[in-house]
Image (cartoon, rainbow, N blue to C red):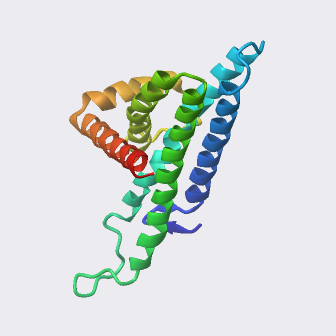
Amino acid sequence: MLEINGYELVYVVFNLLLVGVSLIFTEALIGVISSPKKSRWRSFFLAVFSVGWLAFLPNTGYLIAEIRHLLDYCPSVENDICLENAWMIAPFFLYAWIGYFAFTVIIRRVANALNEQGYRFLGLLMSGLIIPFTALGIVVGLIGRWNTLDVVSKAPEILSDTVRLLATGDGLRAWLWFSALLGFLYGATTVLV
């Protein structure tokens, strides 16, 4: 199996697929938000697609953090320069950029759908709350080593571990830093585009 610093590259494909699932839930959620309000099944599908969207959205931000697999990884050093694997920065940067792009586009699309239906305040509130929620998902994945699929089968353990992580200085600090980073990235994109 191909790997970088113990990170199997098959997870790159897996994480990109999870981002794809997040995009699918986004489009489904937008479809329900935009559907006639009198639809009999609207509330049911709104709940189902919202839960799916919330469960998979942190995978977009998680891609930004994957560069951590390159930390301290250099098989050979010449004159304090890692020559052999300097090329790896570019693919990990691209991987992070895909996560950043997906994260901002997904939130913006849902917020815009809410705005178009006359729920401007809800769109702003959702954008503001989803950023720290996504950051929490990143921390739970990075430090707690949980993944989206565990949410279904191990929800009580994840909740307990999340409370424990936030009670520690390192977990809380990581959550605050990721919240600030994602907030900055989303805000900068909103201002620039």
* In-front residue for pair 144/128: 128
Quadrant of the rendered image containing residue 150? top right
* In-front residue for pair 49/36: 36
Rendering coords of residue 120 (x, y %):
49, 25
Rendering coords of residue 51 (x, y %):
59, 26
Rendering coords of residue 29 (x, y %):
65, 30
Kindly identify the residue that appears in the image at 52 percent across and 57 percent down: 98
Q: Is residue 181 above or below residue 152?
A: below
Q: Is residue 3 left or right of residue 33?
A: left
Kindly identify the residue that appears in the image at 38 percent across and 65 percent down: 70
Q: Quadrant of the N terminus?
A: bottom right
Kindly identify the residue that appears in the image at 61 percent across and 57 percent down: 13
- Residue 85 visible in image: no
Query: Residue furthest toward the right?
Result: 40
Quadrant of the rendered image containing residue 23? top right
* In-front residue for pair 96/165: 96
Q: Is residue 115 above or below residue 36?
A: below
Q: Is residue 117 left or right of residue 125?
A: right
Kindly identify the residue that appears in the image at 65 percent across and 26 percent down: 33
Q: Is residue 5 above or below residue 107?
A: below
